[in-house]
């Protein structure tokens, strides 16, 4: 099935998508069910708002474990679908949850919007900056709800923390720091090998340039290969940078500077294990991002966290010693003035509930695709500084890098001929 035929068929479906009454459960399908997708499916299985109609993955080997996770929660075993086009062409499906590798986030979201589906897409929103803008345009064009999986946007304690910041509790906010400091493993070196049985590697590759199968570019380790992933800046760092950008109340940066490279791991990873990136915004505000994924001891008592600095104090947001998420407010003298944590209900469920509420009343969700795009933009720009070794100036209106053709070319990618290749790139 080629793209023209496929999109022509599903665009008609968008005109007759199922009307969801206030009391109805939403029919949802999960696309990508290994790891993060399996966790999503298990959480959805316990929610009265959701009816899981299918679990979809190009690797049939991951289905039994995901199906078991759902069945243990609600006693039902959703059917397995290997081709995502079957999900998108099913008019009974109201929304899709996309937990694929990064290079599939935008193509799947664009096709889902074309098909009249609302979308929950995991972070980072896109594989490259241009894709993110296409996702925003598709959501608006088709009037779709598109929520990005930056769950902190719905976490009660983080909402309260940001409320304190915006209300002036720490004075005039000048700077924020976000960090991703944790221990990841050396993945070693592996040769290309035959595609495992049960894997549709053609569809897994999708519109990305084709590379031979390699275990160090496949399950999870795709994160560390530029063809498919965005490194740990896009994998984990986006959560913290989203909170920091939110606290600062800023959009696109004007200047991005710093460094990012491999200093510790001698393996097949292409993406940096160490980064120090500074984002400067109009109005004199700055966001500092620090990443070290080769040590176990974290920073400020957290492996991943955010600090917001104002003229009258500071706020730290995160999770200390693996306990509940929360925040701490320090006064101008550095004394702890307020300490608050969440209960046991995780941020994921709050974020899902917000998505379902938005689908029902057709309002923008907490992590609307425009919000997700702007935070993911920071990841892309930081990665470009790392890859080129140069600082950049960014035009936020044109969403273009000024005066550096090579760096600007990394805001988008080349796609191989494929039914899911985005248009307008």
Image (tube, rainbow, N blue to C red):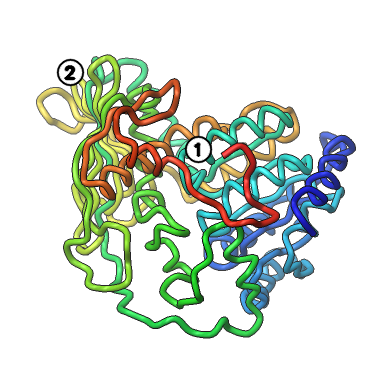
Q: Residue at x 48, y 51 (%)?
A: 344
Q: Tag 1: Cα neighbours inside 10 Å, few (<14), some, or many (≥20)?
A: many
- Mark identifier at residue 130: 1
Q: Tag 2: Cα neighbours inside 10 Å, few (<14), some, or many (≥20)?
A: some
- Residue 373 in view: yes
Image spot of residue 237 (x, y percent): 35, 47
First of labels 1, 2 by sequence position: 1
Image spot of residue 303 (x, y percent): 27, 54
- Position of the N terminus, as image quadrant, is bottom right
Image spot of residue 164 (x, y percent): 35, 23
Residue 110, by quadrant, is top right
Q: Residue at x 40, y 53 (%)?
A: 230
Image spot of residue 285 (x, y percent): 25, 22
Reply above or below: 102 against 60.
Answer: above
Q: Which residue is mark 2?
A: 311
- Position of the C terminus, as image quadrant, is top right
Q: Residue at x 87, y 36 (%)?
A: 19
Nearer to me, 418 or 147: 418
Q: Residue at x 51, y 37 (%)?
A: 154
């Amino acid at each position: 099935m080629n793209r023209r035929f496929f999109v022509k068929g599903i665009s008609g479906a968008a005109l007759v998508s199922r009307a969801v009454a206030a009391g109805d459960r939403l029919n949802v399908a999960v696309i990508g069910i290994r790891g993060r997708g399996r966790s999503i499916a298990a959480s959805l299985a316990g929610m009265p708002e959701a009816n899981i109609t299918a679990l979809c993955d190009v690797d049939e080997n991951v289905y039994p474990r995901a199906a078991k996770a759902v069945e243990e929660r609600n006693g039902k075993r959703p059917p397995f679908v290997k081709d995502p086009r079957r999900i998108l062409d099913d008019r009974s499906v109201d929304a899709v949850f996309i937990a694929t590798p990064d290079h599939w986030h935008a193509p799947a979201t664009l096709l889902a919007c074309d098909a009249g589906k609302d979308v929950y897409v995991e972070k980072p929103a896109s594989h490259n900056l241009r894709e993110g803008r296409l996702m925003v345009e598709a959501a608006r064009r088709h009037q779709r709800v598109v929520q990005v999986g930056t769950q902190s946007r719905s976490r009660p304690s983080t909402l309260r923390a940001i409320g304190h910041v915006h209300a002036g509790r720490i004075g005039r906010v000048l700077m924020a720091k976000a960090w991703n400091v944790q221990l990841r493993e050396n993945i070693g070196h592996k040769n290309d090998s035959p595609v495992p049985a049960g894997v549709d590697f053609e569809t897994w590759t999708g519109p990305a340039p084709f590379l031979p199968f390699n275990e160090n570019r496949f399950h999870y380790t795709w994160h560390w290969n530029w063809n498919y992933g965005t490194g740990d800046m896009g994998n984990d760092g986006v959560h913290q940078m989203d909170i920091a950008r939110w606290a600062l109340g800023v959009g696109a940066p004007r200047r991005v500077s710093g460094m990012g490279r491999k200093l510790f791991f001698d393996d097949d990873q292409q993406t940096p294990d160490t980064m120090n990136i500074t984002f400067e915004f109009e109005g004199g505000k700055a966001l500092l991002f620090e990443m070290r994924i080769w040590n176990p001891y974290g920073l400020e008592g957290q492996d991943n966290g955010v600090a917001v600095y104002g003229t009258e104090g500071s706020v730290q947001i995160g999770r200390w010693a693996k306990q509940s998420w929360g925040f701490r407010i320090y006064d101008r003298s550095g004394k702890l003035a307020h300490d608050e944590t969440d209960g046991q209900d995780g941020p994921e469920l709050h974020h899902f509930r917000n998505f379902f509420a938005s689908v029902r009343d057709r309002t923008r969700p907490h992590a609307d695709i425009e919000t997700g795009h702007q935070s993911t933009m920071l990841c892309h720009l930081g990665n470009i500084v790392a890859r080129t070794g140069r600082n950049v100036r960014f035009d936020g209106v044109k969403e273009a890098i000024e005066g550096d053709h090579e760096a600007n070319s990394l805001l988008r990618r080349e796609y191989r001929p494929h039914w899911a290749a985005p248009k307008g790139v």
